[in-house]
Amino acid sequence: MTDSIPIFKYALITHDTRGVYTLQIQNAKSVNILGSAEVCELLGVFRWLGTRQDARVVVVRGTGEKAFVAGANIYEMAGLESEAARSFITGLRRLCDAIMDIPVPTVARIPGFCLGAGMEIAAACDIRLGSKDAVFGMPEVRVGIPSVIHAALLPKIIGAGATNWLLLTGENVSATQAEKWGFLEFVCESGAENLDLLIEQTVEPILKNGPGAVRAQKALLRYWSEADLEASLDRSVTAFGDAFKTAEPRTYMSPFTQGMKSGS
């Protein structure tokens, strides 16, 4: 049994019996603009999701098909002084950190605009899937500020050259280009049904895997991204051994070993 899902102003949480949680970002803006109020609440929402023991996958999406997240609220930022600006961006940093800390796979569902803070939130997710109408960009320099916080993930995802071009020009790119760069894993034809099908084609095989193994793999992937090779190998050996403290390896290996026996 799961706890009842809290009611939020800027997020709609749904889940199914398989353990697939969907967080739908929503506010009064049709393109899911994030101000400090939205960021503050979403931080709590993502942290709450990270505690769900029944969760197998978390899908992150916006409301409607016009945008995933079209950026931070420029009207709010325009009135900020230096210290308030630091506080604003620190909140967004904590939000992206909370996404990365979720112990199960996170999948970004991306139609339409994915700009600035939206691209940083997508970068914080493990898997990014988009439709052909998706548009990506980091336009901060065009409004007099640098791209910061989880834009720092981009060089590892799309490479230094592509990151330089994106952040220094402030130009947008298509879903096709984002896929070529490696920001998107897969792209589908435009339309909610096509994008939902693409999401399911990724979620369904994750659910076939050992839930403990997937959580352990996610933890290793996060550790590998920050540690040197020797430390990564040491942590990997430990994680492999720890898996055998549970019944999961025997359970999930059984169909293969039984098949080998019956075929001999």
Image (spheres, grey):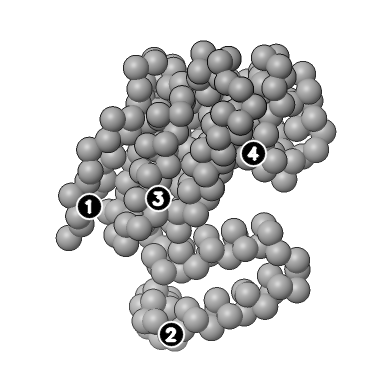
Residue reaching furthest right?
161
Which quarter of the image is occupied by the N terminus?
Answer: bottom left
Local packing at callout 1 (Cα closer than 10 Å; few below 14, some 14-19, many 20+) is few
The image position of residue 141, as x and y in percent, is 72, 19
The image position of residue 54, as x and y in percent, is 29, 59
Query: Is residue 32 visible in the rendered structure shown here?
Result: yes
Q: Which of the 4 quarters of the picture holds residue 44? A: top left
The residue nearer to you, when weighing 244 against 118, is 118
Local packing at callout 2 (Cα closer than 10 Å; few below 14, some 14-19, many 20+) is few
Q: Amino acid at mark 4?
A: Ile
Q: Identify the residue position indicated by label 2 in the image.
A: 245
N-terminal of the two: label 2 or label 1? 1
Q: Identify the residue position indicated by label 1 in the image.
A: 17
Q: Amino acid at mark 2?
A: Lys
Residue at figure coordinates x 40%, y 29% from the top left: 37
In the rendered structure, the answer to whether residue 184 lies left or right of residue 161 reads left
N-terminal of the two: label 4 or label 2? 4
Residue at figure coordinates x 57%, y 39% from the top left: 90
Q: Identify the residue position indicated by label 4 in the image.
A: 149
N-terminal of the two: label 3 or label 2? 3
Query: Is residue 173 visible in the rendered structure shown here?
Result: no
Q: Amino acid at mark 1?
A: Thr
Q: Amino acid at mark 3?
A: Arg
Q: Distance of mark 3 from mark 2, alpha carbons?
A: 28 Å
Q: Distance of mark 4 from mark 3, alpha carbons?
A: 18 Å
- Choose mark 4 or mark 2, whichever is in front: 4
Give SS at disc 3.
helix
Q: Distance of mark 2 from mark 1, alpha carbons?
A: 27 Å
Q: Which of the 4 quarters of the picture holds residue 122? A: top right
Q: Identify the residue position indicated by label 3 in the image.
A: 47
